Amino acid sequence: ASTAFTAARAKASAASRRYFDDPYVSLLLPPYCSSNESGGIIQPMIRRGYAARQAAVDAAIRGFLQVTEIAPRRQVVILGSGMDTTYLRYRDGSLFHMHDSDAEEIEVQQHRQRQRQHRTRTDWWEVDCPAVIHRKQSALAAMQIPSVDGAFEQNSGNLNFVCHDLKTEGILEALSMRVEPHPIPPDNVDNAITFDAILPTLFVAECVFMYLPCGALRSLLSSISTECTHPYLCVYDPIPGTSSTYGKMMVRNLRASGVIPKEGCAMTDPSCANVCSYLNLLKETGWGRDGGSACGCTMGVAYQTVISSGRRKAVNAGGRISPKEGGDGMLDELEEMEIIMKHYALLVAEAGSNTSKYDGLFSEVVAGKKNVVGFYHGQCETL
């Protein structure tokens, strides 16, 4: 639970300086986590990093929504969700805010037009430990989220909560069980919706797999890729490398703080040391098969390709408010930022069925073209 609140504090701090639009994350924090004194001062570089991280993951989710827009129904599963606000930002439309006025307006209008045409329903699941899920349910109930009739996305579907330890097996069985009470007014289409492994489903893991034992991670990835008919995956994780001084420092600091166990985890395993080894792990666990594909790059590359120019400009400028108003100002620690971003990766993958109209559209990279997420051929690694 502590890592969930730490991440939420950093995101709330970045949102307050308008690195991105998120009016919800600060409201999800418990009172003792809301002040700087409770967890130490959040440095500008941390805010920049979280802003880039959210922009990259948002791009992957938007890519999935675009690829599956003709499906009558699809699903998004946030693994190790913490205080994630993606569903809320999808409902109000801010998931599509790229701070690039022309491109943003075009994308928003095109999305709304396609949604009206296809009436695609999107249901969301959040998976985490009971303490985090229960805290978030209480916070959402207190926020009084408006009904779906007032939402940007009229067919946004339901938000469902699942208490499950990702170190154990049975993720799909757990998804079939929804935790009550439901804190947000449900979509009036169907209040009794259940998880369906046949539907196109995106699994999002944002700094989650790094904590799992290697065996548990392999089991989880294999279970999803083989038991779901149209599974998609977005992973954002640190990649410490095998000989990087900075990577060794990352691992040492996380071990000293008790965040990762001394006996090891995925972050300390060679299979997750860099983009290529991580892609090999995905291949070994069933991703990329039967018409599917996988690709990935460091965040240093994603920052220049996947992230929109508007979001990148906001990060470089230290938010969309001036230093006099509390903004961080222009980025001048360029070398430090580059080093940090080389040690994080964004990867997307899908496991095909050889019969699906969606196969390859999410993560395939074709020479001379930018794929739906934003990866460029020659600037990313592929299976």
Image (tube, grey):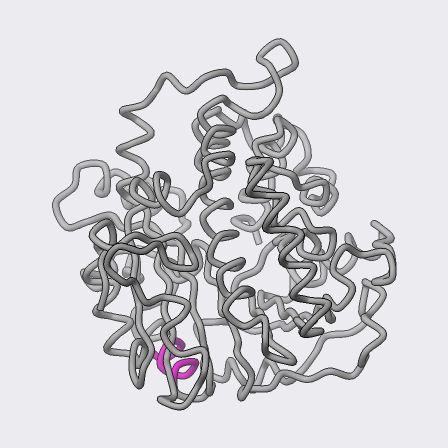
Which image quadrant: the C terminus? bottom left
Residue 188 at what x, y percent from top left?
A: 85, 74
Q: Residue 299's quadrant in the figure? A: top left
In this view, 307 is above or below 19 = below
Residue 318 at what x, y percent from top left?
A: 51, 23
Q: Residue furthest left?
A: 243
Q: Which residue is more in the foreground, 186 or 373?
A: 373
In this view, 308 is above or below 63 = above
Residue beneath the point at 68% across and 35% down: 34
Residue beneath the point at 50% across and 84% down: 170
Magenta segment boundaries in residue numbering: 219-225
Residue 223 magenta-highlighted: yes
Residue 322 at what x, y percent from top left?
A: 60, 14
Our reading of the magenta stretch's main secondary structure is helix
Residue 206 at what x, y percent from top left?
A: 46, 56
With 160 as the anchor, is 172 left or right in this view?
Answer: left
| Count of numbered circles in the view | 0
With 361 as the anchor, is 143 left or right in this view?
Answer: right
With 279 as the anchor, is 362 left or right in this view?
Answer: right
In this view, 62 is above or below 238 = below
With 129 as the anchor, is 213 left or right in this view?
Answer: left
